[in-house]
Amino acid sequence: MCRILEQMGPRDQHFLLFPFLMLFLLPGYLALLDTDGGWLTSSHSALLEEDSCTIERRDATLTYSQFIEQYAFSRPVILQGITDNSEFQAQCTKDKLLTRFGDRPVRLSTANTYSYRKVDLPFQEYVDQLLEPQDQTSLGSETLYFFGDNNFTEWGPLFQKYTPPPFRIPGTTGAYSFGIAGPGSGVPFHWHGPGYSEVIFGRKRWFLYPPEKMPEFHPNRTTLSWLLDTYPFLLSWEKPLECTIHPGEVLYFPDRWWHATLNLDTSVFISTFLG
């Protein structure tokens, strides 16, 4: 083989070596595709996780009584391995969702704490044009975000494949909210009732404050802007609870807790709001 290469010119060497290179590179590419469902994000646009996660993680040994006593009304927790949503994940790859819903309209919201502007756009157009990395200078009112406002007539059969966390707060029922968003996007600080949020593909970083500790933020500035301009100057006692949620992990947030989110990659996620 070496003698053959020596007798060839550089161009011919490239043609000969290309199939061999593909044998080495293709498995890695397919593994990456399998990991993120085709929602590829270039490495230069991916954002960093926090230095240290400050939210407790609990595995499937957590009982319902422990959840109620230790977390349901007092603090957030990350649940691992409590449900198997591999079938739902398999239905949420980029190719499958575009094939199934590409020509269907989706309703987008602005990433502004107090804004209620909605924009309808074909799902294919949203994926092709609006999943680009977030610009730090963009205002929340200028950032369109696909989360919630799902048409359950069209998306309902997909949601039937999802298994929500088994722990319910007495007197509440769950309502799903499904979303897909690009790196650097997210929702600024706000609060509402309790719920769960699970990442299907990608990574989502969370920042949380208890109800009595309102964070310092501008309602029309994005979470990315807050992270870069405000977060570095917070004193230790001013910093939020925070952690990055990975595929298969579920974050539980209690009632009226302030929270903001930041998608570190192109992320697919689903929340279960308890109302």
Image (spheres, grey):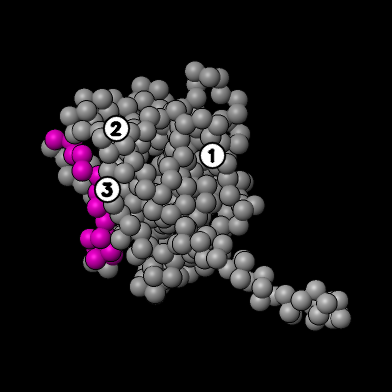
The residue that label 2 is drawn on is 254
The amino acid marked with disc number 3 is Thr
Q: Compared with residue 125, is residue 229 higher up or lower down, i.e. above or below?
A: above
The residue that label 3 is drawn on is 83
First along the sequence among labels 3 and 1: 1
Helix or strand or loop: what does disc 2 sit on? loop
First along the sequence among labels 2 and 3: 3
The amino acid marked with disc number 2 is Pro
Residue in the foreground of this view, choosing between 102 and 70: 70
The amino acid marked with disc number 1 is Glu
Helix or strand or loop: what does disc 3 sit on? loop
Q: Report x, y in % for residue 5.
A: 81, 77
Residue at mark 3 to residue at mark 1: CA–CA distance: 24 Å
Q: Report x, y in % for residue 230.
A: 58, 31
Does residue 63 appear to the left or right of 6 in the view shown? left
Instruction: Report the span colored magenta.
Output: 155-170
